[in-house]
Amino acid sequence: MPPDSNVAKKSDSPVRVEARHRVRLMLTCLCDIYFGEVGISTVKILEHLNCEVLFDKEQTCCGQPPYNAGDWSAARQVAGLTMRALLESEDPVVMPSASCAAMIREGYPVLYEGMMHPEVFELGEFLVHQLKIRSWPVTTANPPAKRRVAFHRACHGRGIGLTNEQEMLVGSLPWIQLVRIAQGEQCCGFGGAFCATHGAISAGIGMEKLHNIMKAGAEEIVSGDMGCLLHLDGLIKKNKLPLRTRHFAELLAEAIAP
Amino acid sequence: MKAKPVNHPAVEAFARQLAETTRDSVRATSVKVIESRKARLVDAFPDLEATRTQASQIKDFVLANISNLLSQLEMKCRLNGVQVHWAKDAESARKIILDICKEAAPDGGTIVKAKSMATEEIHLNKHLIDVGYNVVETDLGEFVVQIDNDTPSHIVAPIIHKNRREVAKSFEREGLGPYTESPEQLAAQARKHLRERFVEAKIGISGVNFAIAESGRLVLVENEGNSRLSTTAPDTHIAIMGLEKLLPSEADLPLFLKLLAGSATGQRMTVYTHLISGPRRKDEDDGPTAVHLVILDNGRSKVLNGPYKDILKCIRCGACSYVCPVYRQVSGHAYSHVYSGPLGAVLAPALEGIEALPELAKASTLCGACEEVCPVKIPIPRMLLQLRDEAMRKGVAENPIPWTLFTFGATSGLRWRTGLKMLPMARIAKHPLKDGWTEFRELPKKEGRDFRKWWNGRS
């Protein structure tokens, strides 16, 4: 289906979430290290929807880097901290990354045999399925200029059953035109440490994705995972391509009145 | 510090020297097949998800009851007049086949072969040629592989790495006819050459797509007609199958035929479907007088009892390769094993042992596309992770990335926060992953506000 047809009908009035939710933010290591704005946008989005956001300062990383590299004993140690810091409370845990959510939900039960799949949420998934948001409640008085955006679905989203949640919200912004990209369902080539140990293959996959995006006439790539975007942005800058990358949380936060 | 010479993993090293034209050929075919797969399977089945689940469960049943089903298959085959042989490894399989050949054609001569990955696995051709047989591959793709002294680079599309011009040049070199790039004319040239081989051959060798335990029927699918000729024109037909290629009953067949054709080539049905029930009967005019079935173990029983058991559910459709972003960049030859792509990245180390192929499972982004298209829902990404863990635990991983510093930092909130403050220094520090990143990408920079500072500032 083309992205445009996925967009849910916009409601006449902005959605109000009446019940007050308390949620715990998992910032994710990439947002902690490089992309603070994505974390800030996530908090703004959730508060805009009447959620109370808690942030545990002891949190670090979900443990996926060593897990994917095959160092499962290291991964268990890191996962142990995440479980203590975030998973012991009753509040839902929300994170701006499908990859980290997939690690916790699908990876932890592999690391710890017999463990129930922990209930954590990727941000778009939480907004659409828990808060029942179909169309983003725009409140800004100064909407940005119209622009063409390519949405990249991060592969790890499908591991936790995500489909078009993030795109639907981004596509509901009046100034965003989502374009259809060839081979859109293909991976960006990041793959964690793979992108460095198999650099030529990873860059080859990434460049193919970027060329398909440029061919579609987009100027911006939006995704829900900073891993994909970190890699694509590195390729864009090295090759001086006329593209920029944004996390979808930043686009939604842009629509909130200051 | 002197820089160490770059030691790339085998698949990466292969990708770096691969011709762009090869990559283009692999990518073009892969994209095309995945698009037809979508048209034939995804859009045509009322509920593909349920269909795949059903097929997956049938294969689970096969693996759980494999001893009984194999006994049943053997008994039914014998009743049908098919001679059954058990081969515990490649060497014994070759010996069994060679003995049959010596009896059927003691003076040598031509052996025609239909496409079979099991024969590739046991390197059969070389051994038969060494003792004087004229072994001829009759599948068009395998025929090109043979005349070029190459190996298949996809389990279904053996010459996915070649373009039409390369095939045309090979045909001209072999004197098969005047140079032409027309696929129809190339096929006609091969057909003319192969027809004579079918006539003179005393023995035909094929693989098996499905062996039905209930009836002892051997099922072969193909599109060119060469399998039909290979299995019916010569007096002796030898079929070889991996012991997992079973279906419990006849009723299971339609589902698997549809899934295989749709996944492998994006077809509703293959052009030919052969149901082989035994040798020529007394009242029949043609067909082989002897049919042999060689059931190959070659490491499969060991896999069956280990953590990678699910890979034996594979029906060899090759969709996981077509859809794999890594495979599309590197072709099948990069995997240095008969079985390539995501299937091979699990099956090859599972069969050969992690010590023999410790790095193969790392040649993956873990994107999950393979599992998503797999007609029997094999959890390939999970097994790739298990293989990485096994390599690490057994200490056979080559150039493992040290996670000690990261783990030290990520297992304490305090150390993590201290580490975050020291990160600007990391930009100038050495790290085993850094060169692989910067060769193709700019290093990331911290952009915008810091989350923790912002959070602390508002409360």
Image: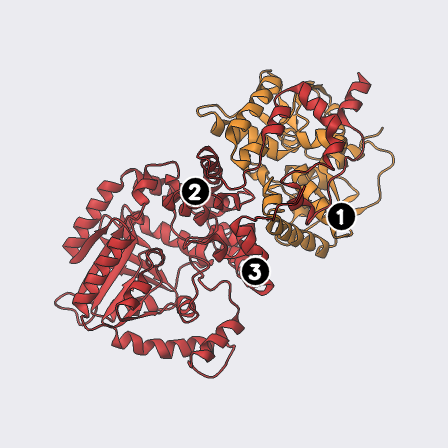
State the image coordinates of residue A74 (x, y, percent, origin top left).
Answer: 54, 27
Picture residue at 66% right of the left edge, 44% below the top = B2
Q: Are marks 3 and 2 on the same chain?
A: yes
Callout 3 crowding tier (Cα within 10 Å): few <14, some 14–19, many ≥20:
some
Instruction: Decide which of B290, A67 is in the foreground and name it.
Output: A67
Instruction: Decide which of B211, B101 is in the foreground and name it.
Output: B101
Q: Image quadrant for the C terminus of chain B?
A: top right
Question: Which chain is tinted red?
Answer: B
Q: Which residue position is annotated with label 2?
A: B378
Q: Which residue position is annotated with label 1?
A: A237
Instruction: Decide which of B231, B151 is in the foreground and name it.
Output: B151
Left or right for B318, reference A26: left
State the image coordinates of residue B406 (x, y, percent, origin top left).
Answer: 62, 29
Instruction: Say whether residue A15 is visible.
Output: no
Disc 3 to disc 2, C-alpha distance: 29 Å
Dot 3 or dot 2: first in sequence order is 3
Does dot 1 land on a helix, a strand or a loop?
A: helix
**Amino acid residing under circle 3:** Leu
Q: Which residue position is annotated with label 3?
A: B18
Question: Which chain is tinted orange?
Answer: A
Mark 2, mark 1: which one is toward the viewer? 1
**Amino acid residing under circle 2:** Ile
- CB-based contact (under 8 Å), mark 3 and mark 2: no
Left or right for B71, reference A71: left
Q: Chain of mark 3?
A: B
